[in-house]
Amino acid sequence: MMRKVIAAAFKSKGKKKMKRSELIYTMSFDLNWFTHEGSKKVVEEAEKEGLLAGNDEVQPTFDLDEVDLTDFKPDLSELLSRSVTDRIIEEIAIKLKKDSREIVSMVNRKQEELGGIVSFPVAA
C-alpha cells in the first residue's frame, strides 16, 4: 500500500520529483489523507522502505505508471503497522504482477510442501 500512496501523491501533482515538504503538504492538505504529522511519518517510512530517493527533493524509486490506483484509499494505521512479512508479500506480488492473496496462497502451499517445518515468514 505504501507504493500506492507515494504513486498517488506524485500523480495527483503530475510530477516525477517534488520537495519533501510539498509531498507532505500534498498528502495532508491537497488530498486530505492524513494529518501533517501522519504525512511526515508516511514519507519517513517510504524512505526507510527504499520507495523514495533524494534529500530535500525526493522522487519515487519505481515506475509510477506501473501502479494501479483503481479505488485506492489509504489507511494510515495499516500503513504504519505493516510487518516485514506484509512488506515481503507486497514486493513479491508486485514483482510477479499477482494479487497479494494469491501470493499468500503460494506461500502457504510452499510451507505445506516443506512439511510445516518452517514458519510463514520463512516460507515467503
Image (cartoon, helix red, strand yellow):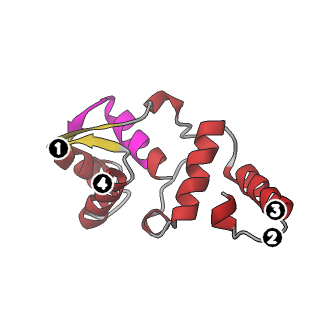
From the image, tell me which residue sits under label 4.
Answer: 43
Label 4 Cα neighbours within 10 Å, binned few <14 / some 14-19 / many ≥20: many
Sequence-first tag of 2 and 1: 1
- Nearer the observer, disc 2 or disc 1? 2
Cα–Cα gap, marks 1 and 4: 12 Å
Sequence-first tag of 3 and 4: 4
- What residue appears at the point 61 percent right and 46 percent down from the top-left corner? 92
Sequence-first tag of 4 and 2: 4
Q: Secondary structure at mark 2?
A: loop
From the image, tell me which residue sits under label 3.
Answer: 114
Instruction: Determine if the magenta segment contains residue 6.
Output: yes
At label 2, the amino acid type is Gly
In the rendered view, would you say 8 is above or below 124?
Answer: above
Residue 124: x, y in percent?
Answer: 66, 57
Label 2 Cα neighbours within 10 Å, binned few <14 / some 14-19 / many ≥20: few
Cα–Cα gap, marks 3 and 4: 38 Å
From the image, tell me which residue sits under label 2.
Answer: 116
Q: Magenta segment range?
A: 5-18
- Nearer the observer, disc 4 or disc 2? 2
At label 3, the amino acid type is Leu
- Residue 39 is drawn in which quadrant? bottom left
- Nearer the observer, disc 3 or disc 4? 3
Q: Secondary structure at mark 4?
A: helix
Sequence-first tag of 1 and 4: 4
